[in-house]
Amino acid sequence: MLLSSDLSKPVVLMRTLPEVPFLDHHTLGNFLARRFEAQSEKLSDIPHPNQLKDAQKGAERLARAIRNGERIALVGDYDVDGVTSTAIVKRFFDLIPYPLFTTIPNRFTDGYGVSKNVLERLDADVIFTVDNGINALEAAEVCKSRGIDLIITDHHTPSEILPDAYAIINPKQLDCPYPFKEICGAQVGWLLMGLLKQELELTINMRQFFPFLALAIIADVMPLVGINRAIVKTGLEMMQSSTLSPFVLIRDFLNRSNVSSEDIAFQIAPRINSAGRLEDAKIALDFLLADTTEKAYHQFELLTALNTLRKETEAQTTAEAMTHVNPNDTVIVVAGEHWNEGVVGIVASRLVNHFQKPAIVLSIHNGIAKGSGRSIGAVDLYTLIKAQEHLLAKFGGHKMAAGLSMSSDIVEQFRQGINEAAKHVNPADFIPHNEIVGELEHEMINFQLLELLERFEPYGEGNPRPHFLIRDADVVAVKLFGSDQSHSRLELRPSRVSQKTLELIAFRRTLECPENKKMSCSYTVNKNEWNGRVSIQLMIERVF
């Protein structure tokens, strides 16, 4: 039987293959176009930032602080969205110019967000957050007692009780009229800076931050529809010509004619994330703030080394987590002593992909289980976790991802409780969004198809790259390649009446020929660039 060494690309066996239509270029184009019929993709349709509740109030307070020479501090977050948010705001303040003290909490010594520990090292009149703070009840009380005005900007789902802060800017607040709710932390911070620009009557061009916004939107898995899609398309185009050192370095590293959303998601975002996961997010922030290519190169080398270490740590933790999984659970909950807190979110993603179920992975230290969860399909993981709120010390997040902590002795009670709650979820919600769209005749797989697919980029959440089906193909050959023989190249003949074959690639997966020499699989069609030569590359996604 077929084997997979990479849990992120699982082998899933199905008794019956999905019934999907045969597609030509015209029907495929119509299918993809329908995804965007109800969504405007004009930058001019980005709602005015003053529609964000408290945004005007927050901008006015920051403007007054700047005019009066008050001390301002910024607290970011250690993931890509949080680091990029911090970089956008720091670059904006540099343009004013006005001194801004920036700090990103260390995952291991500070914990998440604007914690009491972080506040102890801040000496400021005004503190504002990006990509965190919506549940910072204690921090708000500390700020109030010290006479500090706290401005929270966040995009995570609020609880019923909000911090007693000077201003809370979050589109997910129930009484916030901002019409587009699914924006990332960097977008909220950017919108606030847009209002601050108006308050200070500056002429700063806010479009210059689009490459950073594109990076954050893609990395934080925001839906690539509507204004998100418009910003990402423009931001990726601007990356191609940007003279800013981090983007010069990204272009050189990718060595492609065009930077795609998938390049960012799979090549760049994991490197930026690795700093906060394993060491300190300041390494990533210094990369995004680098003012010379030499500085950017040095920081990127550090990020690449950390990312290599992250992969090793993640692989080891994933293997251990697999042994803890109860395969009968609807929501996977696993915990382990001293698992690295920085990789538990990725391990959760690996388990989701392998088992096709939501997963929560917890690391136990000193009697406290702390970790992350990832969801699948339309399952609202935040709501499921919230149903167990009485068991939790802290939790936060949104529909597809969440963080949480609890006493280690109630992990089993939590596991049982969340699985009981999951029984009430519609089974259809567990179906992944990257469904197969159809089958393609051999002659349809050509450069015209590649051009058609490029027309609907960027692909990502809300606009998945189309998956196509090969049904009952003859397996002509299976070969392993790479220095460690960890990749597979398959030659398949989809039709017995034709001698034409297709070559498909499975990176980081070792596959072998099934006994009956027949295979059904889904695949994507990708553009491959190597030494200036462009070719079509078919990538295996799932084997049935």
Image (cartoon, rainbow, N blue to C red):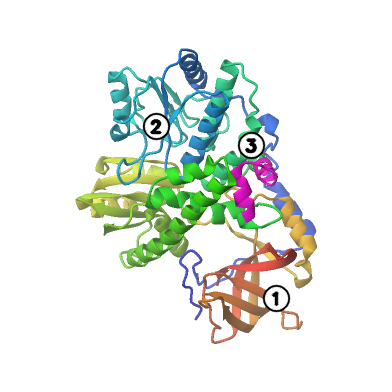
The quarter of the picture where residue 163 lies is: top left
x, y percent for residue 61: 46, 16
Q: Is residue 90 magenta?
A: no
Answer with left or right where residue 81 lies relative to residue 360. right
Which of 182 and 422 lies nearest the eye of the viewer? 182
Q: Residue at x 27, y 59 (%)?
A: 336
x, y percent for residue 73: 41, 27
Q: Is residue 244 magenta?
A: yes
Mark 1, Cα crowd under 10 Å, few <14 / some 14-19 / many 20+, is: some
Pointers 2 and 3 in contact (CB under 8 A)? no
- Residue 8 numbered mark, or none: none
Is residue 215 depicted above or below 511 in this figure?
Answer: above
Magenta range is 233-252
Q: Which residue is mark 3?
A: 227
Amino acid type at image mark 1: Leu
Amino acid type at image mark 2: Ile
Mark 2, Cα crowd under 10 Å, few <14 / some 14-19 / many 20+, is: many
Q: Earlier in the sequence, mark 1 or mark 3?
A: 3
Answer with left or right where residue 47 lies relative to residue 153. right
Q: Which residue is mark 1?
A: 502
Q: Earlier in the sequence, mark 2 or mark 3?
A: 2
Answer with left or right where residue 270 lies relative to residue 211. left
- Residue 134 numbered mark, or none: 2
Q: Earlier in the sequence, mark 1 or mark 2?
A: 2
